[in-house]
Image (cartoon, grey):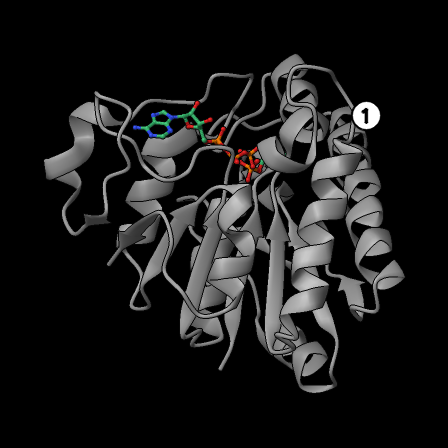
Amino acid sequence: MTVVLKLGGSVITEKDTPDTIDGDALADAADAIAASGVTDLVLVHGGGSFGHPHAAAHDVSRTEGTQDVAAVREIHGAMRELNDAVCDGLVERGVPAVPHHPHSAGHRDADGTLSLPTDPIAAKRDEGFVPVLHGDVVTHIGSGVTILSGDELVVALAEGLSAERVGVCSTVPGVLDDDGEVIPAIENYADVRRYLGGSDDTDVTGGMAAKVHALLGLRAPASVFGPDALADFLGGEQPGTLIR
Ligand SMILES: Nc1ncnc2c1ncn2[C@@H]1O[C@H](COP(=O)(O)OP(=O)(O)OP(=O)(O)O)[C@@H](O)[C@H]1O
Ligand SMILES: C=C(C)CCOP(=O)(O)O
């Protein structure tokens, strides 16, 4: 039973300080993953303070591209650095994490549709590794490169690997209504659109609104929850908001 789990960049980094890992949060997340014993796992992490400030500095988003090779290398390089730290934290705890860098593994066509072959990822999983992907810059036909968000990766992986469970761990305990209460379940974007905003921090990929929109397109149920509920999710529970 394949589980696709995204660790929000806002969870594992200090999102308001560029290029800074939140070491305690990363350690807690890695502890929870190691202790869960879940092995059929594909991980994704977001950009946080490694991805978004560099993308914003070069005016790159999911739709605005750049052909500037220095920008490509800067954004991708920052994300590789974060990916190294995530993989290191997992391997130190006995989780066989291996990187899978989207910049080298996928691209968008001229309409922005993502092509990301999942066979190489399935092969890693089937060999007992835990592939760790991340938000990145990807080649976009006619636009140079654009940003690929971790949330888009979650959707592509969940579909391509026929995942049974999908989890998105963010800083918030779930999708919140206007009173700050967690909305238990979402089945329709129109029902919750009025509650959804972007991110509190620099975020070129759209915050919660884009997340919910993307997850509603999945066949598998997806849970949005906070870091405290990561162990519960990995234990088979559906904490936070269930999107189906
Ligand atoms: N209705 C809402 N409920 C919960 N969070 C919301 C809502 N509307 C907007 N948000 C914002 O969405 C943010 C979560 O999305 P964001 O994309 O920043 O998180 P992430 O995926 O953890 O980080 P990253 O994009 O770096 O990977 C929250 O921190 C909050 O600021
Ligand atoms: C900004 C970059 C490079 C990655 C964005 O991924 P996200 O944090 O999942 O939206």
Hey, which residue is sitting farthest bottom in the picture? 126
Rendering coords of residue 13 (x, y %): 70, 30
Q: Is residue 23 left or right of residue 213?
A: right
The outermost residue toward the left is 191
Evaluate whether residue 181 shows in this view: yes
Reply above or below: 57 against 75: above
Residue 183 placement: quadrant: top left
The residue sitting at 80% across, 71% down in the picture is 96
> Quarter of the image holding residue 123?
bottom right
Residue 174: x, y in percent?
Answer: 36, 40
Position of residue 191 measured from the top left corner of the image (x, y, whole percent): 10, 37
- Give the structural element (helix, strand or loop) at label 1: helix
Give the amino acid at mark 1.
Ala
Foreground of the two, 9 or 135:
9
User: Is 187 placed left or right of 150 in the picture?
Assistant: left
Is residue 109 at all visible to an observer of this figure? no
Residue at 66%, 75% in the rendered image: 37
Residue 73 place in picture, x, y as percent: 81, 33
Q: Work out which quarter of the rendered image holds the C terminus and state it.
A: bottom left
What residue appears at the point 57 percent right and 69 percent down from the top-left corner?
117
Q: Quadrant of ligand 2?
A: top right
- Count of picture labels: 1
Please state if 54 lies on the left or on the right of 194 as rendered.
right
Q: Is residue 116 above or below residue 190?
A: below
Q: Which of 166 and 108 lies nearest the eye of the viewer?
A: 166
Does 239 sit left or right of 136 as displayed? left
Q: Label 1: few (<14), some or many (≥20) within 10 Å?
A: few
- The residue pinned by badge 1 equals 70
